[in-house]
Amino acid sequence: MSKSLNRGPENAPRLLPGLAVKDGMIRHPFDIEFGVGTSGLVAGRHLNVGHANDRHATAYYAVAPSIFQSLLVRWRRCGPSHTLDQYTFIDLGAGMGRALLLAARYRFRAVIGVEFHPTLARIARRNLALWRAADRARSPMKILCTDAENYQLPAGPCLIFLFNPFGAPVLRRLLKAWSQSLGRCEGLVDIIYVNNEQEHVFESRKDFKRLFSGRVKRSQQDTIADRNILASQPGAEYAASPWEDCSIYRWVGKTGNRDWELKDKE
């Protein structure tokens, strides 16, 4: 495993622990149906790249398609400030790119993945190429191999997707940096947060408004698939539930008012 940020993806290992059949990896029905490779579970301790943020990495596991689709519907109910084709969809901690593939089925301005592990980024890049070749992409797609803190948000409206990719210290620094760069551009950034373990970081700020908080159910197919996939991992370190705890937030500016009611709560 590369321990230097100066080494490129070509020097990274071909497989990480949790991505091989011998590690208990089972393909998700999404991968089987569409001929891509987004399955597997990689614990955070196996995602070291020699970066100061290594210790804040959580794990790699792809979002359930039904969770993603349900959350996109909920977000659109929350009244985005612009039309969908004006938004750039950004997945921070994109892994092997399943959320990017799902997002590219919609007409976003662009779909961008940010992944700091070169092996996962390399696999994601291959998956994006397969998606394009099968003519499934309705949005331009790309994957960047860099740390989330090094990534600058593009101009224009952004929809940021987080599947609990890192711990509170990284999220706290990201929100602070965005706050400084966004100024008073209210409504330009919305955030979909799946497995929202660090939700307290958002709640401690006045410049992000919570639009939704609650449990989002997996489909029966995803529930069965995720349960079988996680149960097959050595040590059964992670478990699947029929839902994910999720949130949706919106940047409301430095003078944002937190005295409001949730638009949608379960």
Image (cartoon, helix red, strand yellow):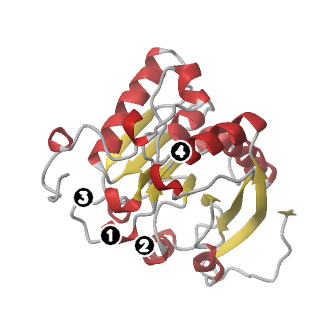
Q: From the image, state whether disc 4 or disc 2 is nearer to you.
A: 4
Classify mark 4: helix, strand or loop: loop
Q: From the image, state whether disc 1 or disc 4 is nearer to you.
A: 4
Mark toward the start of the polypeptide (2 vs 3): 3
Amino acid type assigned to the residue bearing label 2 in the image: Val
3D distance between C-alphas at marks 2 and 3: 16 Å
Callout 1: 10 Å neighbours few (<14), some, many (20+)? some
Q: Residue 38: x percent and y percent?
A: 47, 36
The residue to which callout 2 is attached is: 170
Q: Residue at x 35, y 43 (%)?
A: 120
Classify mark 3: helix, strand or loop: loop
Q: Is residue 20 visible?
A: no
3D distance between C-alphas at marks 3 and 1: 9 Å
Q: Residue 207: x percent and y percent?
A: 62, 77
Q: Which mark is residue 62?
A: 4
Q: Is residue 105 visible?
A: yes
3D distance between C-alphas at marks 2 and 1: 7 Å
Vertical arrangement, residue 93 with respect to residue 184, above or below:
above
Mark toward the start of the polypeptide (1 vs 4): 1
Callout 4: 10 Å neighbours few (<14), some, many (20+)? some
The residue to which callout 3 is attached is: 49
221 left or right of 3 in image: right
The residue to which callout 1 is attached is: 53
Q: Residue at x 62, y 79 (%)?
A: 200
Amino acid type assigned to the residue bearing label 3 in the image: Val
- The part of the image, by quadrant, that contains residue 239 is bottom right
Mark toward the start of the polypeptide (4 vs 2): 4
Amino acid type assigned to the residue bearing label 1 in the image: Asn
Q: Residue at x 40, y 50 (%)?
A: 114
Mark toward the start of the polypeptide (2 vs 1): 1
